[in-house]
Every structure is written in C-alpha cells, then in structure tokens.
Amino acid sequence: MRLAQLREARHLTGAQVAQQTGVTQSALSRLERGKNSYVTPGDVRLLLDLYDANEDVREETLHLIASARLTPYWAPHRRALGALEEYVALETEAQHIRYWQPLLIPGLLQTEAYAHAVIAADRFDDDASLVRLKVRARLARQWIVFGDDPVQLHVVVAEDALRQRVGDPQVMRDQLDRLVREAGRPNVTIQVLPRAVGAHPGMAGGFVLLNLPWLGDALFIEAGAGGVVDRGPRVREYGRLLGRLQSMALPGEESAAFIAQVAEEIR
C-alpha cells in the first residue's frame, strides 16, 4: 500500500513511526495492508506529515483511505450481522480480546458445524439461507485470530461450555479437538473454569473486553440478537471481574489437558 512505500522511502521502521506519531505499530501494520477500517483521517495526516508527502500524494492517499473505509471486510455480511456490526468493527481493530463465556465456545474459535448448530438453535425463526449467511459471517471474523497480524486472544470458558451438547457427538468432539489445537498458538490462551470451583463472579453471563489502544477500551455484553457496547466505567469493573475469573481458572496447559479429557469422554 502507498503508506508502506512512503515509510520505507524515509527509511523509517514501524517502531519509529509509532514513537513519533502515536499511531501504534499494530494499527500501522493493518493500515498499510488495507485492513484498518477504523483509522481516522487525522491519523493518516500525521503519517503523511512525517513522510513529508507532497500535495498530490496526500490527496490520493486520503482518497484511497476514505474509499477503503466505505467497504470494510464484513460488508458482504451486513445482513447477517445486523446490530452486531458496531461490535465487529471494534473487534477487527482490537489488539487484545478477552472472553468470558459460561455456556458456549466463543465464536472466534467455533468450528463451522458447531457455529451452524448454535446459530440454527438461537435463530430458530430464520430461514436456512440466513442461517448459512450468519455462519459464514462468524467464520469470516476468525481471520483476526488466524491471519497474518493476529490479535491476542485470551478466553476463559466454564466447564459447562465444554459439556453443553451442541449438535451431535461428532460436532462436539471436533470442536473440543480444535480448542486443544488452537491453544498451542502463541497468540491464543484458553483457560477452563471447572465446576468444582463452585460459586464465582461470572455467573451472571458472558462478556468480551476489547483492548483498543487508539480508540479506548470497550466492553461488549450480548443481549438478544445484538448486544451492548460500553466504553464507560464498567470496562474497568469487568476487567477486574475477568481477572478474578482468570485467577480461579486452570492454567493454560492444565486447561488443554482438561479439554482433551472431556473430548475423550464424548468418544
């Protein structure tokens, strides 16, 4: 992309640009690859000033950025996302995503068959074509975890999420096997909160915390077909709550072994 060429022409590293402009290296990397749909024109102007771009280059670059922002990657899935679009926009730009999920495997780690079973059960009034579209939309979102510039993903799931039967036994085995595999990725941490811990502070329901260094951190709480995005004081409150759940849950390696054991029981 043009911005990468301008930076390289000035012999600047991503770290140097971040230090001089305040645009994080992660944001810069996504922007240079055309992945950043939430970048502001102000950020781009800061970069162009640093690169000493002439007026023609500035005009062309700002036009390209504006055009790119009109067509985010999830555009083909807007009908399926509905009220979730605001959250997906933030999710795409997050540097670190932390989940607490008491009953289901988080969408960013679901297999296609598991996602289909969950969505078909939850959206029982939707026709089959819309269910398939929602499944494709959910799977498309997973590129942020498994792509070239992956987000850091930290998931805490309750044991009930592993044992809640979704689809047939094969669907559950495949889903649990995938969790074990993905837990080995350097950017993915999966912890299990066993039933044996008893009462805990996460019993009210699941939520997601998004670390957005250049936009401000956000909290997402699912509600019906959509959810609520909050950037107020509750973000810190839920951060403490999730920290407590992480401390109560099994460490990563023990969690992977626990998941494998549940999968073996299903076999």
Image (cartoon, grey):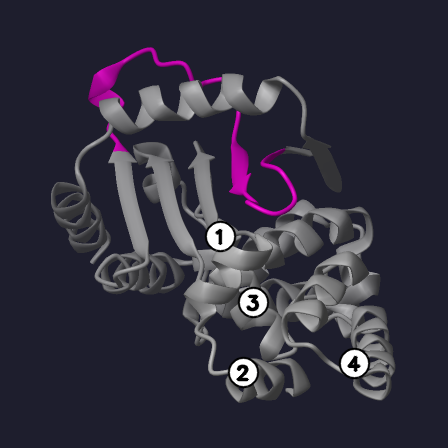
Asked if residue 205 is among those painted magenta in the image, a careful observer would answer: yes
Q: Give the foreground label among 3 and 1.
A: 3
Q: Quadrant of residue 254?
A: top left
Residue under label 2, please give it.
10
Residue under label 3, please give it.
28
Residue under label 1, please give it.
95
Which range is magenta? Answer: 193-219
Q: Give the foreground label among 1 and 4.
A: 4
Say whether residue 127 is visible.
no
Q: Give the foreground label among 3 and 2.
A: 2
Residue at image x 75%, y 41%? Answer: 226
Secondary structure at badge 1 equals loop
Secondary structure at badge 3 equals helix
Residue 208 lies, in percent from the top left, at 53, 37
Q: Along the line of sight, which residue is nearer the eye, 257 or 28? A: 28
Q: Which of the two labelled residues, at mark 1 and mark 4, occupies the earlier sequence position? A: 4
Residue under label 4, please give it.
61
Secondary structure at badge 2 equals loop
Is label 3 in contact with label 1 (beta carbons under 8 Å)? no
Q: Which of the two labelled residues, at mark 4 and mark 2, occupies the earlier sequence position? A: 2
Residue 37 lies, in percent from the top left, at 72, 65
| Amino acid type indicated by mark 3 | Leu
Mark 3–mark 1 Cα distance, whole angstroms, equals 12 Å
Relative to 246, is 161 above or below? below
